[in-house]
Image (tube, rainbow, N blue to C red):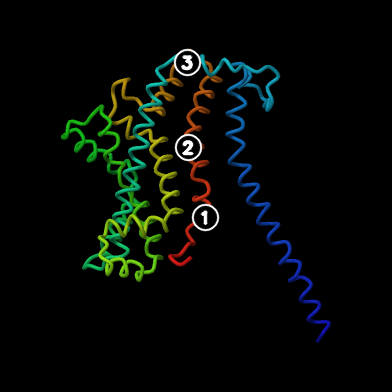
C-alpha cells in the first residue's frame, strides 16, 4: 500500500510542479505573439523605404532614419487629427465612466420591476455589431444636424453595454449594509455613489477607462460615416488617407502608426496599478 501511494504521489507531484511552468510558458508565448508586430512596426519606422520589402527583417536598423517621423508629420495635418481624436476619446471615456457607473449602480442596488429584463436587453445589444445600427444612427445624427461635428462622433459612443455590465458586476460585490448605513446618516444617493461606491470600484473604473479610450481612439467606421471634411478627421482617418497616397513612403506610414499607439500606452501606464488589481475586490477590506 505504501509503495502504491508513493507511485501515485510521484507523478502527481511532478504535474503540480510543472503546471505553473507550463502556464508561464504559454503566457510568455502569447505575450511574444502580441509584442512582435509592435516591435516590427517600430523598427521599420526607423529604416529606409526599401528596407520594408526585404525578405529578411532587420530588427536593428544598420542605418537609423529618425527623420521619417518629422517628414511624415509634415505631409498632412496630423496635429489637427491628433487633437480631434484626443477630444473625442477623452469625451467618450468620461461619458462611459459617468453614464455606465450610474446605470450599473441603479441595476445593482435598486430593486424595481423589470430590472433583470432591462439588464438582459442591455446585454443583448452586445450581439449587434456597429454595422447593423449604422444607418439608423446616421439618420438620427443627420436629423440633429450633427454631421461633421464633435457631438456627431461622440454621441453614439457615450454609453456601452459592456461598461454597464462591468460596473454593475463591480457594484454588486459591495455590501448593501454600507449603503443603508449611509442613508440612515442622511446621505443622498449621489453622495453615497461618490464617497462609498466609487472608491471601491477603482479597478473596474480603470479597466472601463482604458477600454473606452482605446475603442474610441481606434474607431474608424463611425467617424468615416459622419465626417466628410478634413478639419474633422480623426487620427485613424488621417492614417488611412496617408496610406492611400502612394507617394508616401511605407516607413513613414509605420512612423505615423507608432505615434498612434502612444496615447493608449500612456493611459495604461497611468492606470496600471488599479488595472492590475482585477475585479476580485469585495466591499470588505
Q: Residue at x 27, y 62 (%)?
A: 187
Q: Which residue is mark 3?
A: 246
Please tell me in which quadrant of the rendered image residue 39 appears. Answer: top right
Of the two numbered discs 3 and 1 in the rendering, the one whose residue sits closer to the viewer: 1
Q: What is the spatial separation of the Cα atoms under label 1 and label 2, in whole angstroms?
A: 19 Å
User: Is residue 161 placed above or below 156 in the rendered structure?
Assistant: below
Across and down, in percent, residue 128 comes to 32, 49
Q: Residue at x 48, y 29 (%)?
A: 260
Q: Residue at x 79, y 72 (%)?
A: 10
Q: Report if residue 282 is visible in the image.
A: yes
Which SS class for mark 2? Answer: helix
Task: Determine the residue located farthest toward the bottom in the rendered image.
Answer: 1
Of the two numbered discs 1 and 2 in the rendering, the one whose residue sits closer to the viewer: 1
Q: Report if residue 56 is visible in the image.
A: no
Q: Which residue is mark 2?
A: 264
| Quarter of the image that includes the N terminus | bottom right
Mark number displayed over residue 109: none
Which SS class for mark 1? Answer: loop
Mark before the other along the chain sequence, 1 or 2:
2
Q: What is the spatial separation of the Cα atoms under label 3 and label 1, in whole angstroms?
A: 46 Å
Please tell me in which quadrant of the rendered image residue 105 appears. Answer: bottom left
Amino acid at each position: 500500500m505504501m509503495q502504491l501511494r508513493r507511485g501515485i504521489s510521484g507523478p502527481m507531484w511532478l504535474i503540480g510542479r510543472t503546471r505553473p511552468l507550463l502556464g508561464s510558458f504559454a503566457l510568455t508565448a502569447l505575450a511574444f505573439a502580441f509584442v512582435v508586430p509592435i516591435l516590427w512596426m517600430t523598427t521599420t519606422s526607423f529604416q529606409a523605404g526599401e528596407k520594408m520589402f526585404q525578405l529578411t527583417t532587420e530588427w536593428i536598423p544598420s542605418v537609423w532614419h529618425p527623420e521619417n517621423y518629422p517628414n511624415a508629420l509634415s505631409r498632412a495635418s496630423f496635429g489637427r487629427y491628433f487633437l480631434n481624436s484626443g477630444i473625442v476619446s477623452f469625451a467618450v471615456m468620461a461619458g462611459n465612466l459617468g453614464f455606465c457607473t450610474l446605470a450599473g449602480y441603479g441595476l445593482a442596488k435598486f430593486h424595481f420591476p423589470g430590472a433583470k429584463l432591462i439588464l438582459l436587453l442591455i446585454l443583448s445589444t452586445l450581439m449587434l455589431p456597429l454595422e447593423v445600427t449604422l444607418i439608423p444612427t446616421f439618420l438620427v445624427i443627420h436629423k440633429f444636424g450633427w454631421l461633421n461635428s464633435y457631438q456627431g462622433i461622440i454621441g453614439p459612443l457615450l454609453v456601452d453595454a459592456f461598461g454597464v455590465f462591468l460596473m454593475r458586476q463591480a457594484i454588486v460585490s459591495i455590501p448593501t449594509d454600507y449603503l443603508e448605513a449611509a442613508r440612515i446618516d442622511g446621505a443622498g444617493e449621489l453622495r453615497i455613489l461618490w464617497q462609498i461606491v466609487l472608491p471601491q470600484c477603482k479597478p473596474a473604473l480603470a479597466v472601463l477607462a482604458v477600454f473606452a479610450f482605446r475603442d474610441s481612439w481606434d474607431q474608424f467606421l463611425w467617424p468615416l460615416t459622419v465626417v466628410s471634411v478634413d478639419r474633422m478627421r480623426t487620427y485613424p482617418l488621417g492614417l488611412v488617407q496617408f496610406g492611400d497616397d502612394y507617394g508616401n513612403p511605407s516607413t513613414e506610414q509605420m512612423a505615423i502608426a507608432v505615434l498612434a499607439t502612444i496615447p493608449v500606452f500612456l493611459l495604461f501606464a497611468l492606470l496600471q496599478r488599479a488595472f492590475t488589481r482585477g475585479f476580485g475586490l469585495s466591499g470588505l477590506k
